[in-house]
């Protein structure tokens, strides 16, 4: 028996009979008002979001309650897109910060431009506003991608802005946030390199929403949404692409499997091929699309190419 084993083989074999995963919001919509459900539907329709009823509902509730949000989930689960959709739906400008060790306090708040200071002094005209200051002044959405990659000393700048909606800038004065100002931050729970622990005081100013992988049925629909409706063998391509990435997520030699991005990339390569490909092209396209998106488990003696070829071959033979 190969690595898939009986359990994974049954998973593949029973795919046609798999019942749709029950979403907690769909299963018990009575816990939310009809108005909230209607707004979530509007967001889904406007931004072509497949599923995510629960996450969108919680995001919308946090926004209405004027709470700042941390979206926690692995890479490729659509956290950024959810944040953008909510900000746009709420007619809020979107100010993005990508977390890294290079993000310092003045990166968030802004700084005085030396030549302008020489000409005008320490005035607002001489100040280059950072994304935090701009979001507060404009009443927009501050989006911090991978908050836990920002140094702890920089994180402290957020405290008064999130709690009191006030930012003190020396020689300029106070910036009082508009009422519509809110922050959405993300973090990857599996990230270990280059991350800083969030301080208790900062975490206390956020509410938390978990963003997991979506159901297989939803991921298939997402892949199809990214392909031309006239693509030959559309359903087959979408189903196989999603099956392949799902198997990378449970493979014993992989620490990190592929996200929906991997399935989309694979499906678009197959689509570009222009005809129904054989096993060899599926393997070549799969390695192209997924090689950089996987992480080997420590201590494994196998390489990514070998693992991908095995997974793709299993899925290919199941569908043919």
Image (tube, rainbow, N blue to C red):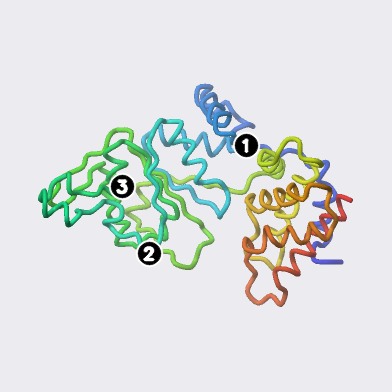
Disc 1 residue crowd, few under 14, some 14–19, many 20+, Cα 10 Å: some
Q: Which residue is mark 1?
A: 50
| Residue 166 percent across, percent down from the top left | 23, 43
- First in sequence, mark 1 or 2: give its number: 1
x, y percent for residue 151: 35, 62
Looking at the image, which residue is at 44% across and 52% down? 145
Q: Residue at x 84, y 66 (%)?
A: 2
Residue at disc 2, secondary structure = loop
The alpha-carbon separation of the residues under discs 1 and 2 comes to 34 Å
> Relative to residue 107, is residue 190 drawn left or right?
right
Q: Are marks 1 and 3 in contact (CB under 8 Å)?
A: no
Q: Is residue 258 left or right of residue 203?
A: right
Q: Circle 2 sits on which residue? A: 101
Q: CA distance from mark 1 to mark 3?
A: 31 Å
What number is the disc on residue 132?
3
Q: Quadrant of residue 292?
A: bottom right
Whole-Å distance between the Cαs marked 3 and 2? Answer: 17 Å
Marks 3 and 2 close (CB-CB < 8 Å): no
């Amino acid at each position: 028996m190969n690595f898939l084993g009986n359990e994974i083989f049954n998973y593949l074999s029973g795919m046609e009979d798999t019942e749709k995963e029950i979403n907690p919001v769909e299963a018990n919509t009575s816990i939310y008002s009809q108005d909230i459900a209607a707004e979530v539907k509007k967001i889904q329709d406007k931004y072509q979001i497949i599923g995510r009823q629960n996450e969108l509902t919680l995001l919308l509730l946090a926004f209405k309650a004027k709470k700042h949000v941390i979206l926690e989930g692995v890479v490729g689960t659509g956290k950024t897109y959810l944040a953008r959709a909510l900000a746009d739906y709420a007619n809020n400008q979107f100010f993005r910060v990508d977390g890294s060790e290079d993000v310092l306090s003045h990166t968030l708040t802004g700084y005085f431009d030396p030549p302008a200071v020489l000409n005008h002094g320490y005035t607002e005209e001489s100040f280059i506003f950072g994304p935090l200051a701009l979001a507060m002044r404009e009443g927009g959405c501050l989006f911090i991608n991978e908050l836990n990659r920002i140094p702890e000393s920089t994180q402290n700048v957020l405290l008064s802005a999130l709690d009191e909606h006030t930012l003190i800038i020396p020689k300029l004065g106070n910036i009082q946030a508009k009422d519509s100002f809110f922050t959405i931050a993300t973090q990857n729970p599996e990230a270990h390199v280059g991350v800083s622990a969030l301080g208790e005081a900062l975490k206390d100013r956020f509410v938390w929403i978990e963003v997991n992988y979506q159901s297989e049925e939803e991921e298939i629909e997402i892949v199809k949404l990214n392909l031309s409706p006239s693509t030959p063998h559309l359903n087959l391509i979408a189903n196989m692409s999603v099956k392949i990435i799902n198997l990378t997520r449970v493979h014993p030699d992989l620490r990190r499997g592929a996200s929906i991005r991997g399935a989309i990339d694979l499906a678009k390569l197959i689509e570009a091929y222009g005809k129904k490909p054989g096993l060899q092209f599926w393997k070549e396209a799969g390695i192209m699309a997924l090689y950089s998106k996987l992480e080997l488990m420590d201590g494994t003696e196998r390489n990514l190419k070998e693992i991908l070829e095995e997974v793709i071959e299993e899925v290919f033979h199941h569908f043919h």
